[in-house]
Amino acid sequence: MLIHYNIMKLLFTLLFAAVATAQNYDTVNFQNTTGRQNIDYNNEMQKGMRVLKRTDGSLIVAGRTGSSSNIMNDFLLICVHQDGTRCSDFGMNGVQDDSGFFTSAIYDYAIQNDDKIIISSNFNSDLNVIRLNSDGSRDVTYGNNGIVTIPAPSDAMGSAGNGKIFTLNNDKVIAVWNYSFSTSPYRYKTAVYKIDTAGVLDNSFGTSGMLSLNYGGFSSFCNDLFQSGTSLHLLSGGIPSAGTGRVTHLQKIDLNGIPDSTFGGNSILEISNVNLSAAIDIKGSTIALCGLGLTVGLFDSTGSPISSFGTTGIQFFDITNAQDSGRDIIIQPDGKLLVLFKGRIGTVGEDGLLMRLLADGTLDTNFNDATSSTPPGVFSMRIGGNNTQDDMLLTADGTLFVTGYANFFNPTGFDIMISKLLVLDAALSTTDVLRNKIRIYPNPVNDLLHYESMEDISKINVFDLTGRKLLTSIPNQQQFIDLTSLDLKNGLFIVQFETLNGLTAMRFLKSNL
């Protein structure tokens, strides 16, 4: 048995080593030999906005739809399994549209721990937050028949056509609304609201339930936010009051809206002459930002630049002749950065592109695309005559799902795109900031997986290699995870530990030997 185990261990080691630098579309297991699916709904125009993962590992591809490229004001949700097949327990054949709802614009989407879906929208100049049940039906227990309506702030002169939505770990919601408060010249600012699980505005948050982001005369939009432990990071970008130049503001508050004075300058990190406000990701003590002009920034938990990423913590890239702009960013478990951006490979239109950076900010030349003329470190996602990829989701096994749109011109033009890439060296591993602080044993394991930790663990999750969550539990005094109730077959699985300092995960082999 010992010999058999050592052979199995060697095989698994060789398997993961052999694919360590591979990345390509999944051409076998996504219902399409290209590793992509285009979704044309009711012969209308569609754009993909978010990829959300449900607790069973299936995905919600969230976007907007309408009769023309300028009128895509209705929400559209498509549920697919990770093999590309549609979900039978969601909407009609895996699709849910906005039938019965009235919206003037769709802003953003988020998902709760119980798979309920939150939608941020605008109707009659008010912010509307909609909640759907996990099957896509209206959640009538939320707000007023499934909708929370928040009137515009008293100084609002109009919506800025932009908002964000975020679900906290306790399923309360943070709703961000950008609006104009001056029209000569146009100036914008941000209102942040906290909504409880019943759909009631939390009046203890900010002032009477609203936190106003005020950056001393700057005209700015809050474009993204991120929860790290008991803190929120709000990412904004804009222009100075004089109307020229660019600026980025990253503000850190607690979950009650109280500024964290230990971060940046009295809770605000201000970065001049650059707009890094497209997207934020945080892993452990590392904060990654990306934005306009294809700029990428890396900062520590205090807001100080990470010097290994350049003296200012910021890198500038010009991949397609000054046509580039960051859309989304993910910190891999090994510290490398995946950056989704739009550029222009051809002479017209936009193209979706993906690059990977090493910890020092240089392009990872092992991240190649043999089918296009992009430089080493850059992967082209070009399809159709015009396309943009806007959001990505990295699962535990290194599978990357990306959504956006492509223009196929006929028969209807814009279609939602969902792409499945295999980036296997981006799989969860123990090469993160906690790798030496938590260990598991025995491995292989039959029934009880024990763990020892130098960190305070708040939650334990077990996944299979498709990303499907099999178990969520809190630590026990005996420090073991009972696998007997899961009825696992022999094979590889992933255990993930959540701590206040971040996440760490490691593979274990389930074996009856």
Image (cartoon, rainbow, N blue to C red):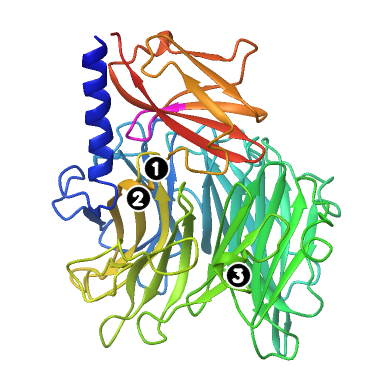
For residue 213, side relative to residue 143 (left or right): right
| CA neighbours of label 1 inside 10 A, class few (<14), some (14 to 19), many (20+) | many
Residue named by callout 3: 313
| CA neighbours of label 3 inside 10 A, class few (<14), some (14 to 19), many (20+) | some
Name the disc covering residue 395, or none: 1
Q: Amino acid at mark 1?
A: Thr
The first of marks 1 and 2 along the sequence is 1
Q: Compute the Cα span from label 1 to label 2.
A: 6 Å
Where does the image place residue 206, in percent across and percent down from the top left? Answer: 83, 53
21 up-or-down from 381: above or below: above
The residue mark sitting in front, 3 or 2, is 3
Q: Amino acid at mark 2?
A: Leu
Where does the image place residue 91, in percent across and percent down from the top left? Answer: 36, 38
For residue 192, side relative to residue 427 (left or right): right
Give the main secondary structure of the magenta stretch.
loop
Residue at image coords 27%, 75%: 374
What's drawn in magenta, residue-wise? 462-468
Q: How many marks?
A: 3
Name the disc covering residue 425, or none: none
- Asked whether the viewer can see residue 188, the reply is yes
In reply to whether residue 312 is colored magenta, the answer given is no
191 and 252: which is toward the camera: 252
Q: Are marks 1 and 2 in contact (CB under 8 Å)?
A: yes
For residue 218, side relative to residue 347 (left or right): right
Where does the image place residue 208, in percent across and percent down from the top left? Answer: 85, 52
468 up-or-down from 444: above or below: below
Name the disc covering residue 400, or none: 2
